[in-house]
Amino acid sequence: MFPQRLTAHLHSKNSPPYVINLDPAVRELPFPVNIDIRDTVKYKEVMKQYGLGPNGGIVTSLNLFATRFDQVMKFIEKRQSMSQYVLIDTPGQIEVFTWSASGTIITEALASSFPSVVVYVMDTSRSNSPVTFMSNMLYACSILYKTKLPFIVAMNKTDIIDHSFAVEWMQDFETFHDALSQETTYVSNLTRSMSLVLDEFYNSLKVVGVSAMLGTGLDDFFVQVSKAVDEYERDYRPEYERLKETLEREQSKQQREQLERLRRDMGAVAVESSSLPGAADASALGPSDLILTRGTLDKEDEEQDSDSDDIDHEVAEERCEEPAFKNFMQETRMRYQSRSGH
């Protein structure tokens, strides 16, 4: 298993990595991890609770985990000084991680803060057929254009078959077509057409042959990783910074528009209440000023508005109640006399 070999290789170099497992369906991990999605989300329980199949359960588990990925980012930030590399093992199904919302959230969160490199591990022993090889290249191409990050194809199992045939197919169009001429199916015709489209993709692709069984090719792999990090700093980080600035400008614009709508709404309220005493002074203030000064008026305003504090409210109420009570008694007496007369 390639992540296991990478972890062991880095430990042997006295550079232990920070390892994260994002595959909720894996039964056993043959290497130690610092963060394991299985500790947070129970894959089988998710399947039962939501009535999902295997792939649906993995996607939903990742979606649940992605809602707390900000905590994972904090752990990674704390370990920056101790670990040069962070290894993240994702589910192998392309539709589960690369083309899911949670996969995009996790990838963009990492790439916006750290130099990030995508490694596509390819089974070389099962790609010696031109059609299967083209299928793998289409997978790799879709991942590259989805993530928009530095990309490395690690052709694994070179202890079984050397990866030189695949490199030759990528570099020599005629050689690939000669191998494809032995295929007579409809898929072979489609593969022949697709090989022309992927020619430019091959030119910029970083390829390295490795063996997870023997540990060969890992030094060359980390040379490619260093080049990919340089590429990230040169080409990708400025783009992410530009996108981040654009997003911040959009958010700031939305906040200003919301504040302006609030000002207009509060201004309309101030105009409607202009007939009240003192409204002329209040209307001179902006909506935010009205909100901030409400309950915290100046001393002069407090002295003008606090005249009612000197009034004896009990005497005032008696003065208002006395004639009202007399009128009530007179009306009652008149109604009683009219009934007695009948």
Image: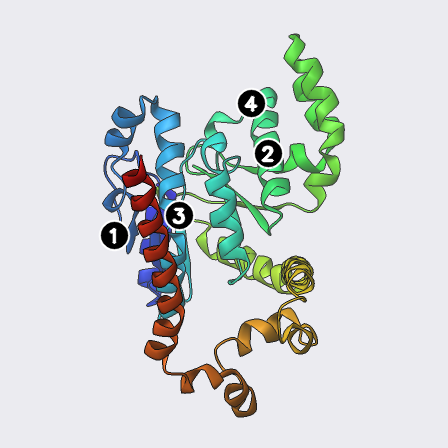
Number of other residues with Cα within 10 Å of mark 3, as a class: few under 14, some 14 to 19, many 20 or more: few
Q: Which mark is residue 32?
A: 1
- The Cα atoms of the two marked residues, 3 and 1, are separated by 24 Å
First reached walking from the N terminus: tag 3 or tag 4? 3
What SS does tag 3 mark? loop
Q: Circle 4 is placed at which residue position?
A: 132
Closer to the observer: label 2 or label 4?
Answer: 4
Q: Circle 3 is placed at which residue position?
A: 67
Q: Which mark is residue 166?
A: 2
What SS does tag 2 mark? helix
- The Cα atoms of the two marked residues, 1 and 4, are separated by 33 Å
Number of other residues with Cα within 10 Å of mark 1, as a class: few under 14, some 14 to 19, many 20 or more: some
Residue toward you, 137 or 82 = 82
Image coordinates for residue 142, horizontal then vertical, percent:
61, 35
Q: Are marks 3 and 4 in contact (CB under 8 Å)?
A: no
Q: Residue at x 71, y 44 (%)?
A: 203
